[in-house]
Amino acid sequence: MSGKGNGTTPLIEVRNITKYFGSVIALNGVSMAVRAGEVMCLLGDNGAGKSTLIKTLSGVHQQSEGQYLVEGQEVHFDSPRDALDHGIATVYQDLAMIPLLSISRNFFMGSEPTKGRGLFKRFDVKFANRVAKEEMAKMGIDIRDPSQPVGTLSGGERQSVAIARAVYFGAKVLILDEPTAALGVKQAGTVLRYIAQARARNLGVIFITHNPHHAYAVGDKFTILKRGRTFGTFTEDELSREEMVRMMSGVDELDALSHELQEFERTDKLQGEGMMSEVDHALAKSLEESEHLFDPKKDNEHPAQ
Amino acid sequence: MATTTVTPKGDERLVEASLLKRLLSRPELGAAAGAILVWLIFALAAPTGFLSLRGAASYLEVSAQLGILAVAVSLLMIAGEFDLSIGSLVGFAGATTAILASEFGIPLYVGAIVALVLSLVIGFFNGYLVIKTKLPSFIITLGSLFIIRGLTIGLTRLITGRTQVGGLDDFAGYAFMRSLFAIDIPIAGVGFSISIFWWLLLGAIATWVLLRTQIGNWIFGSGGAPQAARQVGVPVDKVKVGLFMTTAFAAWLLATIQVITVKSADTLRGEQQEFFAIIAVVIGGTLLTGGYGSAIGAVLGALIFGMVKQGLVFAGVDADWFFVFMGAMLVIAVLVNNYIRRRAEAARK
């Protein structure tokens, strides 16, 4: 894990943010900060308030109470455009791309390069193609033909177009809304690599996920949301994967439970060794099994044996 | 590029897209093939009339009249909207110009400018209502289709007592208007209607705007993923309103050409043209869902329309069959377009 964050002033910081939708409390006193060259993972189960928080950060919602600071200055965003102008770019899960349109046209949508004047002012296709290719190359993807439709790219590559676009247009903070959620293991790995790339280029990254493995792979800090509150911000030394999973609770715990039931016999044997509780064993096991997804060779080993 | 080594998955992309495959991925490909096919069919079925220059002049003029509408409609449809009101706008704009001349003695060119302004206002309202109500443009403009047609007939009858206004060549400004909108340009001894040049000019401008300007990119964005386009700062609403005004402009241009050419205005003029325009655009490879399409395709779609309509006459086939042919063409075009698009995308993977 490189780059633990170098600046003293966070790129963005929220203090005690609350957000009400009528009588529903979506956020109830959330505080967190992101510095340059730092990947902040925002973890939480469904309904924990992740979406509301990032929509507040990206200017879609305005907080009901609390402070929002960008590079130490308090700000109020009325629209996503405001946030963009402050260098805060959000890449949404649905990707915001037009599948049948070319990569370079998607890349420059809304900020098209032009050449010529007056009636002859025109879209600079060559420039757009060249820059799109270059920027994607910086992300580690070699695009053969920037004029090919975005629809021909894989999900992971599409994410990277969106990330490269945000970086090119001067984003200082990248907010990535579950970029790995809909992806296969291999593609998720690709996206994680781009997150590391963005950090290497000294951006602050807020990486939203409910997959602790993905978070652990690239995260420098972890903020856990639960029922609209921050559970705290931890560094990776302070928080083991197991603890992370337990804090997030919900789906993963259910997973663990089902594993516990399925593998009752085996855990039974292990219990002889004492020390660990059944749930701990099941947790460790489910985590190891997810690990295998990244490394198929491990398939037949069993760590606890 | 040194970066090719970064990831092992690069090999999936090593299949190079050939020129043919790139060509196949153009939206207007189906229409180009269709146009050649239709031309061949009638060249064989009715060689004497269809292959003569006079024959060409006649089917090109028919094509031009629809093509002027279709080109504007293609831009609007790429932006994800429909305009069903253009047919009745043709009747409205023509009647306005003619009534201003016949009842109020206003020169035709002034009347035409008034009609243009009114048409643009109607186009603006179509767009404005679609944006503000968030209703499908299909519904909004279906409403304005009937409102405009009804108003045109009602007001014309109220003012003139009839639904047609004739004898426009007696009014001031006719010669000037004719030189712009209705003369024939002789090529190899045969007169080609100036409307053909308007059609091709509009097609060229629309293609330029679509493929080589910032607004063109916005049009694709507005139709392909409006929410996404908004997030990156594309003024989607303005683009759409502007395109509704563009279709209104095209309706006015066609109305003016027709009124000056036949020297009379009929309140029923332009009926069904909105549907033919959509058919031509779809044959041209534009998706009904927006975000993908071509203005050249619309030009070709209109060309097919004109060739079929006049070709049937040359071939001595009863004109009743024209509708059957166009309906079948529409369905086939959609199927072919879907197929080509899927193939083109798969081929590049």
Image (spheres, coloured by chain):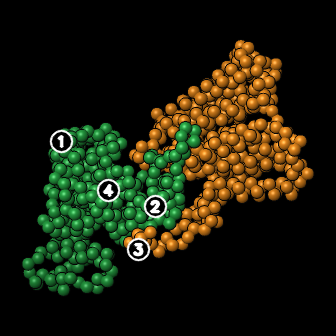
Chain colours: A green, B orange
> How busy is the neighbourhood of tag 2: few (under 14 within 10 Å), some, or many (20 plus)?
many
Q: Which residue is mark 3?
A: B5
Specify the farthest residue to the right.
B48
In the image, what residue occupies the spot 52% across and 63% down?
A145
Distance from Cα at disc 1 to Cα at disc 4: 23 Å
Quadrant (top left/top right/bottom left/bottom right) for the C terminus of chain A: bottom left
Distance from Cα at disc 2 to Cα at disc 1: 42 Å
Three-letter amino acid code of the residue under disc 4: Leu
In the image, what residue occupies the spot 68% across and 27% down?
B93
Query: Of residues A75 and A299, which is closer to you in this image?
Result: A75
Q: Which mark is residue A66?
A: 1
Distance from Cα at disc 1 to Cα at disc 3: 47 Å
Q: Are marks 3 and 4 in contact (CB under 8 Å)?
A: no
Chain identity of mark 4: A
Q: Is label 3 on the same chain as label 4? A: no
Q: Which mark is residue A50?
A: none
Q: Which residue is mark 4?
A: A176
Q: Position of residue A165 (x, y in %)?
A: 40, 54
Compared with A157, B259 (above or below) is: above
- The answer to whether residue A156 is seen in the rendering is no
Q: Sequence-wise, which precedes: disc 2 or disc 1?
A: 1
Q: Position of residue A153 (x, y in %)?
A: 47, 64
Three-letter amino acid code of the residue under disc 3: Thr
